Amino acid sequence: MTQSINPDRFSQLHSLLLDFDDIKRILDEMASLATTVADVAMSCSFTMRYDFGVLTVGSSDERARLLDETQYDTNNGPCLEAMRDNQIVHVSAMRTESRWPTYTARALELGLRSSLSFPLGLRGETFGAMNVYSFEDDDIFGVPERRELELFAAQAAGTLRVAARQVKDTTLLQQMEESLRSRTTIDQALGIIMASQRCTASTAFELLRQQSQHTHRRLRDVADDLIRQTTGQPPEPGRPFDTT
């Protein structure tokens, strides 16, 4: 039987284009929408290629963003490979993965079990990737789930391209730099927790997330407070984007 994506999700996808006051929020919502496509617990992110490199323009949660950033830092991983080769990259079991040793070690620390990365492109040009990450079990993406997600990725490619063109590059860059500052702050806080609690990155992130939920504050704000309390100094700023 031929699988088809729920038309209501296509409608939701297009409705995100109606309001461009906050492009970052819209792209995050699109990533969150992707997590509902298949009956699998997962996180999602969208990567786009720019003249100054690649960056995550939308994510359903911070863990997906951290996995993306690990790939950018090591310059390898399924997301980048999907863009480079214009092929779907499937990681059925991260614990037995051998293609990207440095990324794999970090991904396992964050609790990743399996993933899929779909190239995003229009008219023969690959400009990004949709990444879905599962922390539940190995080999969780079967044929039906892969088909549903592939259909969504194809539709999302057009929406993402249109969304990116609706704002000036300077506005998008400003928002992405703010995202980078948030990620840098969170990474510094995770390092403090890992050192003090002698735990993995995955456990440190869970502890930080629990504190965020308990206090009803943003993850970055909780991380900022932890850094200031520990060091007596504000977080180190993230590296600015170089657009030259």
Image (tube, grey):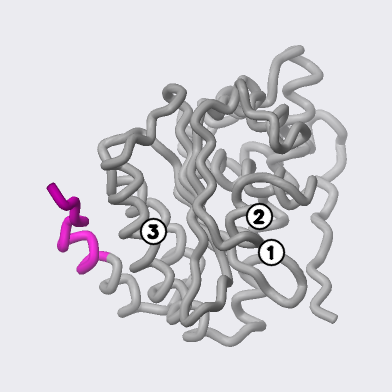
- At x 19%, y 56%, the residue is 4
**Distance between mark 3 and mark 2 Cα atoms:** 22 Å
In the image, taking residue 223 as reference, residue 147 lies left or right, namely left
Which circle marks residue 80 in the picture?
A: 2
Q: Is residue 58 above or below residue 124?
A: above
Q: Give amino acid for label 2.
A: Leu
Residue 85, visible in the rendered structure = yes
- Residue toward you, 127 or 219: 127
Q: Secondary structure at mark 1?
A: strand
Quarter occupied by the C terminus = bottom right
- At x 58%, y 87%, the residue is 168
Label 3: which residue? Answer: 29
Question: Answer yes or no: do the residues labelled 3 and 2 have beta carbons within 8 Å?
Answer: no
Question: Answer yes or no: do the residues labelled 2 and 1 have beta carbons within 8 Å?
Answer: yes
Residue 58, how many percent across, how many down? 51, 59
Q: Give amino acid for label 1.
A: Val
Nearer the observer: mark 3 or 2; the answer is 2
Question: Which badge, 3 or 2, comes first in the chain's sequence?
Answer: 3
Was residue 3 drawn as part of the magenta stretch in this picture?
yes
In the image, taking residue 26 as reference, residue 220 lies left or right, namely right
Residue situated furthest top in the rendering? 198
Was residue 4 drawn as part of the magenta stretch in this picture?
yes
Residue 98, how many percent across, how many down? 69, 30
**Distance between mark 2 and mark 1 Cα atoms:** 9 Å
Q: Is residue 156 above or below residue 184?
A: below
